[in-house]
Amino acid sequence: MNTRETDKQSVLVIGGGVGGIRAALDLAESRRDVVLIDKSYAIGGLMTRLDRTFPTNNCDLCTISPHLSESGRQLRLDLKPMTVVEQVEGQAGDFKVTIRTLPRYIDVEKCTACGECAEKFPDWVRFTPGLDPRAPTCMRYPQATPYAFSVDADKVTDFDALQKACKVGAIIADDKEKTETLSVASIILSTGAELFDPAVLDNFGGGQFPNVVTGLEYERLMSASGPTLGQLARPSDNKRPARVAWIQCVGSRGINRQDVPYCSSVCCMYALKEAIVTKERFAEDIEASIFYMDMRTCGKDYELYLNRAVNEYGVNLVRSRPHSVVEDPETGNLVITYATDDDERHKTEVFDMVVLSTGFRIPASTRELAGRLGIDLNEHGYAQTSGFSPVATSRPGIYVCGVSESPKDIPETMIQASAAAAMAGTQMHLEPDTGAEEEDFPPEIDVSGQDPRLGVFVCDCGPNIGDVITVSSLVEEVRSFPGVACAEAVGYGCSKESMDKIESMIREHGLNRVVIGGCSPRTHETKFQDMLRRCGLNKYLVEIVNLRDQDTWVHMDRPADATRKALKMLEMGVYAAARAHPLMEHSLPMNQNVLVVGGGVTGMNAALILADQGFRVYLVEREARLGGIARNIRATLEGDDVGRYITELAEKVAAEQKIQVLTQSIIVDHKGMPGRFTTGIQTGPRMHYMQIEHGVSILATGALANRPAQYLLGEDDRVMTQLDMDAKIADDPESVKNMEQAVMIQCVGSREPGNPNCSRICCQSAIKNALRMKNLNPDMQIYVLYRDMRTYGFQEDYYREARKQGVKFIRYEPASRPEVRADKDGLAVEVYDEVLGRYLEISADALVLSTGLIADDETTEDLSVMFHLPRSDDGYFLEDHVKLRPTDMSVRGFFVAGTAHAPKSIRESIAQAQAAAGRAQTLLAKQWINLGASVAKVDGDKCAACLICVRVCPYNVPYINAEGYSEIDPARCHGCGTCVADCPARAIQLMQYEDDQILAKLDGLFERMN
């Protein structure tokens, strides 16, 4: 055993799933050293085993692979797989952590993952068991990081033979376990959770019947990297199923011995995704049915996804509680017995496959780790946090993110990861940027006098591309294109193995331009640009042809036409690449000030974190005082005092010298570039104009309380919203105590035309107020009329408690909404009870409407125009990537947090505020900001000084210089191309999108049309 100590202080991230990777990258990008450990032999976690992600149905492999490779190359990031924590001593800012790294018996620097060792000695090389009993190696997915195999030494009988099988000498027979003591300022726990194993249940056939699979196993069946290579087939006979059923809440929301009481928050959405993808990719006539209790689609635009599943794809939703699954031994078909609300008799249906939607469980290993860390766990085994400190554990200096904290989806995990990184970073000083940490690339080769020598490399990406078009025939055709020196199919082009192959061919064939036919440049361009830089080529000599998004995904039902289109797209790419030339990037000094728009809970939290790190913050609020809509909330579902928290938060902001608070202020103009923004503000009662120079902006403008003109709201004082009742309970408890009966109606003004999404907070607000009302008067009769109770995560505990205390829940359908009438004697609510099969009339002293939130449409529209930012259809600010970048916006240097992004709770808003502050630091930590090379350039000989470019530029960049022609400052140009399109003399070119390149693409398109 080798033992050593490390004195250099860093942050330790435990767990290499997407949350741990995001936290580690944020810390490294903000100039903090970080050690990322994972007990497995490759990082990526659960997400790498999924096929697609909702609500976009993107390929997970394509989505996460750039992040996996990024974690492998960050200069401040030390990646240690197969490593566990042994001991933690010390305190926040000065922890001593002992870690133990198990031997891999393979040198990861030498291993090329050729697979020869596994082919010759499959029993000696580790594999991950699952649906595929043939899985030969530990390579769980094509983008495994580190990209190397792992040897099971306990099974090896002849290490000499194993070493001889490896041509590169990567086998280390005498590899030893290593122990190391790290000096760390803070720790982030991101170990995730495991999925429930339904084999312990005796009623659904999990682990017993081959055609009963879990949701994750079904994902593997659909995945290109799965056992059937993306072909949907029943495990029992390899036949394509005609009828597939999903059973929800297996092992969750139950009271049986093997069940957990909480909701796992993701199961409804992944069942919908699997059902949609089944019909979309394999056969529209496959019947997909989901058996569920409540459909909990309460994320951003998730309700629209539910509507698509039902209306566009014909997914059957069966509200029920299935009793059992029985197999027909002759056919392998499965019989589901279930009961519905409207029929007391049991029903049965036959399916070819049954998918069990299982949720999250905290494994025993994580509980043991929590003991070594010295942190408290809640009653369900997850890390204990508080309502106003959502990522801080019970031990100062140790933070948590992702499913280690509570069951959650990927966007919430990514938000918490950035939040945890921000909070962990507060335990260390931010080092000054010396500019000495650029990756060491070789000098660029001058290709200006060379004829184009192009290499064309086409990815198949499993079913995403290769199942639709014939890649091999494409490559043969491409080899005949002018200027093409070589063309090859490269499988998963973004994998390390494929990229090594491309680099080798670039050097071997002396290529000076490259065309990649594969996925979107939005997610993969940077990766391939870095590849060119490693080969000594300018990064702008690569052309990405988006075969996946622009061809195979949209024409998956027309493979022959898709193949012909792919050929034309590649030809266009070849012609354009031949015209490409090296470009120079532009950089500017980074302004270290921050503009935070919105002085509610979210804005104040973000401002305080950044000010604590030494940045000057301008906090702009249009109201006369800070607090936002949270000032009207008295308590959270968990019982936290919101009023006191807001008061203390505002006092901290006022006392912080680094924060300048501008109340009664509005933004009126904006200009500049990322890192060098100037924003005009009118402030104070007299609307005095001032300008703020800042490097980044955080939008935390919040949302509005919805007050729709429904159910006599605004006409009768006895009708109120949940927000009104929350205040009434706190301010006038006697009037509430005297009520005998109260009715609550859910989804008022939400999940309907005009506001089609779920407001997320309404169900928890109803439960919160119902419990508080019961606390005041235990004999009060409270009726909650609902469509779906969406108490996700641990909110289910409070829902269960409300039922226990006698709160009655009556479900209604949109087609038979409750009706309300009022007279002098009181209110009467009529609703159709699906269980009783008849209408009920309920007298009520108060009618409480769960109306939720709506976007502040006027504010978000004004700011989106000024800042050039997109919005969602319902008026919220749109994030850059729904899964992986939920806090970043499409304009670099802008971040969104809180209910300006989507409806969410105070706890979730605080987490995103911390995340926004963390993401902002990834830019603020740098002295210079790279603006890229896509800027407009004027040819002075052609310019007629007509002033058209001066007038049309939305950023007011062009001007007439002393020589009498238009000039565009590359440091201020946004690269939008407006001036290029409007110049009548064609005197302006947009670098990287020049006329000759675009015309070359057209030449390629029409070259063989005749």
Image: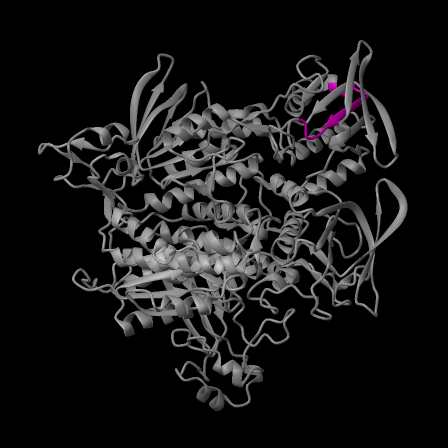
Q: Residue furthest right?
A: 345
* Residue 62 as seen in the image, left or right of residue 637: left
| Residue at x-position 23% and y-position 34% | 984
Question: How far from the left and from the top, in percent, is residue 447?
Answer: 20, 62
| Residue at x-position 56% and y-position 39% | 300
Q: Quadrant of the C terminus?
A: bottom left
| Residue at x-position 41% and y-position 18% | 664
Q: In which quarter of the view is residue 536 placed?
A: bottom left
Depth check: 751 or 629 in front? 751
Q: Residue furthest front?
A: 1010
Depth check: 295 or 727 in front? 295
Depth check: 497 or 623 in front? 497
Compared with 559, 665 (above or below) is above
| Residue at x-position 61% and y-position 68% | 228
Residue 622 visible in image: yes
Compared with 336, 135 (above or below) is below
Question: How far from the left and from the top, in percent, is residue 37?
Answer: 48, 63
Depth check: 895 or 423 in front? 895
Q: How is the image coloured?
A: one colour
Residue 599 visible in image: no
Which residue range is magenta in the image?
A: 736-748
Compared with 333, 928 (above or below) is above
Q: In which quarter of the view is residue 337 placed?
A: bottom right
Question: How far from the left and from the top, in percent, is residue 599?
Answer: 45, 27
Question: How far from the left and from the top, in percent, is residue 641?
Answer: 60, 30
Magenta run includes residue 394: no
* Residue 280 as seen in the image, left or right of residue 200: left
Q: Residue furthest left?
A: 963
Magenta run includes residue 746: yes
